[in-house]
Image (cartoon, helix red, strand yellow):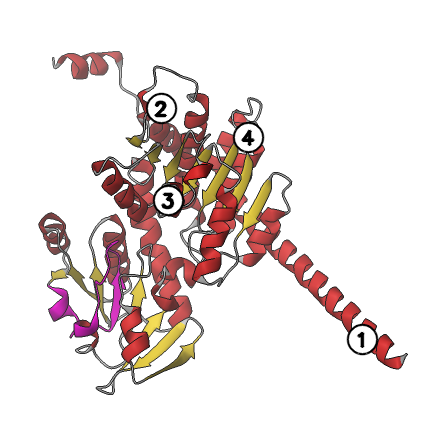
Amino acid sequence: MLQEISERTSQESFTMNHETTDLEMLKTGNQKIAWASKHMPILNQIVEEYRPKQPLRHLVIVTSIHLESKTACLVKALADLGAIVYATGCNPLTTQDDVATALNNNPNVSVYAKYGCDESSYWDFLVEALSHQPHIIIDDGGDLVKLLHSKCAKYRSRLIGGCEETTTGISRLKAMQRKGKLRFMMYDVNDADCKHNYDNHYGTGQSVIDGILRTTNLIIAGKTAVVAGYGDCGSGIAQRLHGLGAKVIVTEINPIKALKANMDGFQVMRMDAAARRGDLFVTATGCKNVITKKHFNVMKNGALLANAGHFNVEIDANFLEKYANSHYEARKNIEAYTLKNGKTLYLLAEGRLVNLASADGHATEIMDMSFSIQLLGVIDIATNRDSTTSQRNLPGLYPIPSYIDEKVAKLALKAQGIRIDNLTKAQQKYLENGF
């Protein structure tokens, strides 16, 4: 009898602790989402404008995005406009479980994601979400598109189209389109002016530094920082590092971007040379094997390695894992690898997106613009789905309509209390006629 009581008490205690943990996660998740929502006035204005019309009513939308507080606001906005949403992550280390718990509490939202899940579970979550046969997808990196062209092709029977958020995903879509393999329409959100000019440059620049500082608690000033890639993301990172006092070196494969980096005041050289000089390395290229064995072997003892690209392929972590003499966790989210030459290198966040795996991602106001473009893009797809004359109903990658960019920019200015000039009729006539 005493054993039965003991076992029952133990089980009740476990259940209570489990329920308490869920309640705590629900509370903290809701707090994070509420804070983000207060700082996303553009998204909120769009929801209020379209809520009476319910343009997404009865549509199934599957999202594969970094599941944290700001993306939760986008998911809730989709549900508020009538959609049934199945939300998954797009990286095993960027889901915040408390936010996922709070989001899952919404009656029109189901979440398939967990922080730190293994690779197999990550793909299982995506497949499970797609099994609900979406009308529209929101992708970040291209994994949903990849599945819908392979093992999940059977789930695209009622797919209208979708939106792609990031540079890496757009690169994948462009490759598919060149080969004639893209089977449905997708909007290129990444190249919208109100996305890449702000999200990629200012957002990535700030959030990557935030991730590095939170993870290492080390100073940037005085260090030599090597930034691989000088696109919208890399240029933002380089400029923020310089602003904090780093001596910045840029590596590039594109001659135009390399020239721009040089004229912006940065040293430009090949990675082979930069590898010997850097104290901190940040990759932002969207390509693989940017930093490899030959670079590791000549780096300084104690060099820090971080990645800002979507996938964990830019820094060859597999080589470090297999061939380092030893490795250990130096600090949360920092793995130390001691090479055969006796030097120790420090890899942040397993070489995954350091701004999301080690911090909270882009600033809320920046993502307000990007997710507003996402939401308006989805609304555009939904409201034009029955148009037989719309070219956008054909498979392919399409730019975001200019009216969406302009609408988001105007709402952003309004939210910041900024007013700008308008053309007079005479000025408009002059520009139209050339005299």
Residue indicated by mark 2:
393
Amino acid beneath label 1: Glu
Q: Are marks 4 and 3 in contact (CB under 8 Å)?
A: no
**Camera-side residue of 273 and 397:** 397
Magenta highlight on residue 187: no
Amino acid beneath label 2: Asn
Q: Please, what secondary structure does the residue beneath circle 1 have?
A: helix
**Camera-side residue of 136 and 16:** 136
Residue indicated by mark 3:
150
Residue indicated by mark 1:
7
- Residue 62 seen by the camera: yes
Is 227 rendered above or below residue 129? Answer: below
Q: Please rate how many residues cluster around mark 2, counting C-alpha atoms within 10 Å: few if below 14, some from 14 to 19, many from 20.
A: some
Residue 54: quadrant of the picture: top right
Residue closest to the far right: 1
Residue 119: quadrant of the picture: bottom left
The residues tagged by marks 2 and 3 sit, at their Cα atoms, a distance apart of 21 Å
Q: Please, what secondary structure does the residue beneath circle 3 have?
A: loop
Magenta highlight on residue 293: yes
Q: Image point 48% across, 46% down: which residue?
A: 71
Q: Please rate how many residues cluster around mark 3, counting C-alpha atoms within 10 Å: few if below 14, some from 14 to 19, many from 20.
A: few
